[in-house]
Amino acid sequence: MRRTLLVALAVAASLVLPIQALAAGPVTIDLTAVGGGGLLSNNSHFGVEALSLAVTTPRRSVSIQNGSLVVDGVRTKCKPTTVVNCLDATLDCDDSSTHQVTAGVPGVSLGSLDGFDVTQGFILMKCFSR
């Protein structure tokens, strides 16, 4: 029992100490998530997932961009490079291609990929900055 308590205290300390260090100065977080899938107006099936995370602290900055795009069963690793108003994103892919993703707006549109409208399914884009 005593050993379990010591392990729990060590884990708690390891979680609290970095948070205290971050609180010593300004911290900025930018997060964008893109996801969706379905059928496009050109009859292509697609799936998209992308994540962009940037965290800046007084000590260092961390940036992660990761994702993939699947069109008609062909998967390509991509990363989001540009996000405009949390509605439009540019994906740069490993096969040297660039794709434009537009988020759907409920009641207005289902989104689009490279100018082709989503006819079934949806593209969702969420952003967070602090």
Image (tube, rainbow, N blue to C red):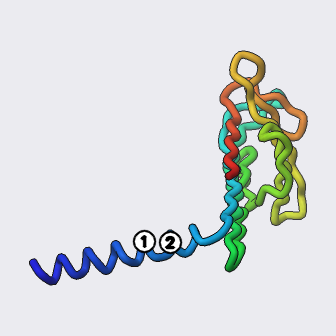
Mark 1, other Cα within 10 Å: few <14 / some 14–19 / many ≥20 = few
- Extreme-top residue of the structure: 107
Could you tell me which secondary element the residue under label 2 belongs to? helix
Count of numbered circles on the image: 2
Q: Nearer the viewer, residue 118 or 124?
A: 124
Residue drawn where x is 34% and y is 72% of the image: 12
Amino acid type of disc 2? Gln
Of the 4 image quadrants, the one containing the N terminus is bottom left
Q: Residue at x 82, y 53 (%)?
A: 91
Callouts 2 and 1 close, C-beta under 8 Å: yes
Identify residue for label 2: 20
The residue identified by callout 1 is 16
Camera-nearest residue between 26 and 74: 26
Please name the residue shown 69% across and 25% down the image: 120
Label 2 neighbour load within 10 Å: few <14, some 14-19, many 20+: few
Answer whether residue 67 is visible to the viewer in this image: no
Answer whether residue 110 is visible to the viewer in this image: yes
Question: Quick check: 55 above or below 103?
Answer: below
Answer above or below: position of 45 versus 16: above
Amino acid carrying mark 1 in the image: Val
